[in-house]
Image (cartoon, grey):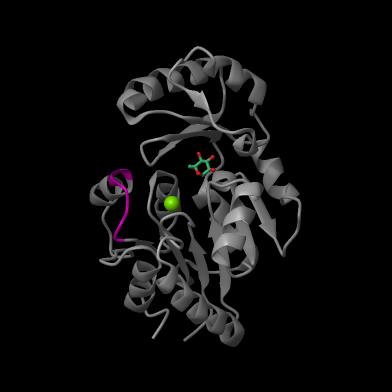
């Protein structure tokens, strides 16, 4: 057994089965103590909604936190996001212009204020309207030379973020900083905003058994040996995958 970099999405990946979560926490805590394994949460949630879940589910204190779909990285319990990462996201980002362009789309409903972040503008968008709206919105944003990326998850959430940002890029930033090779990195996820975790590099990946159609479709179109589709759901699927890759016994 050796040290590895463990990265997981929260909602419906790490969290969703309390009993399995407690089991996984025990494994991870022990591994961190014995081998210096690092634990990272990568979620779409803002600091406020993350804190809520952390208290509700008694989550382990992570070594780093990737919040707001990869647009904010917090290390060593720091209350402010990593400024080096923010600097990478700044060029070509114009929040006000993005908001004004999205105002032309009546299907887009702004998410609560807490989820609107410096480098993230988020809406609810019904699945039925999604394909048409996403196509037109993307074209309009690019026409205005905005350097952005649209991330649609779970048939309801639309995040607009800088093109240089997503959960995968944020993990890359951390693994370079901490010098973890791909073979010693594992990411876990269930939905659209996790695709970037799997698409970046050749690190190991665990897709939990309850994954959403958008991630399953991506996996079917981009199959490879270093991504494992678990049979079990949520934390139980993660334990299954960690054993499959030999990270756990
Ligand atoms: C979380 C965030 C929300 C985001 C969604 C998908 O639910 O709170 O703002 O749209 O994740 O990334
Ligand atoms: Mg999720």
Q: Is residue 210 magenta?
A: yes
Q: Nearer the viewer, residue 33 or 115?
A: 115
In this picture, residue 232 sits left or right of residue 88: left
Q: Position of residue 173 (x, y in %)?
A: 60, 55
Q: Is residue 185 magenta?
A: no
Residue 217 quadrant: top left
Q: Main secondary structure of the magenta part?
A: loop
Residue 115 quadrant: top right
Using the rendered image of the protein, determine whether residue 200 is visible from the camera's viewpoint. no
* Residue at horizontal 23 percent and vertical 50 percent from the top: 220
Residue 204 quadrant: bottom left
Q: Position of residue 14 (x, y in %)?
A: 45, 63
Residue at far top of view: 104
* Residue at horizontal 72 percent and vertical 52 percent from the top: 82
Q: Nearer the viewer, residue 47 or 71?
A: 47
The C terminus lies in which quarter of the figure? bottom left
- In this view, 159 is above or below 31: above
């Amino acid at each position: 057994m050796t040290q590895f970099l463990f990265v997981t999405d929260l909602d419906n990946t790490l969290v969703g089965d309390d009993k399995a979560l407690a089991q996984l926490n025990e494994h991870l805590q022990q591994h961190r103590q014995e081998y210096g394994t690092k634990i990272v949460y990568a979620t779409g949630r803002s600091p406020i909604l993350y804190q809520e879940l952390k208290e509700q589910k008694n989550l382990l204190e992570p070594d780093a936190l990737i919040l707001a779909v990869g647009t904010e990285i917090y290390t060593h319990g720091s209350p402010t996001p990593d400024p080096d990462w923010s600097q990478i996201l700044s060029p070509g980002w114009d929040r006000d212009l993005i908001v004004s362009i999205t105002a032309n789309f009546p299907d887009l409903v702004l998410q609560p204020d807490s989820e609107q972040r410096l480098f993230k503008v988020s809406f609810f968008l019904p699945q039925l309207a999604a394909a048409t709206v996403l196509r037109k919105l993307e074209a309009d944003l690019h026409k205005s030379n905005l350097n952005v990326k649209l991330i649609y998850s779970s048939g309801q959430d639309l995040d607009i973020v800088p093109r240089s940002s997503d959960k995968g890029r944020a993990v890359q930033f951390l693994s370079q900083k901490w010098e973890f090779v791909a073979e010693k990195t594992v990411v876990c996820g269930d939905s659209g905003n996790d695709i970037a975790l799997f698409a970046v590099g050749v690190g190991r990946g665990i897709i939990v058994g309850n994954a959403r159609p958008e991630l399953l479709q991506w996996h079917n179109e981009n199959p490879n040996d270093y991504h494992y589709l678990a049979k079990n759901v949520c934390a139980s699927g993660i334990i299954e995958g960690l054993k499959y890759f030999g990270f756990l016994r």
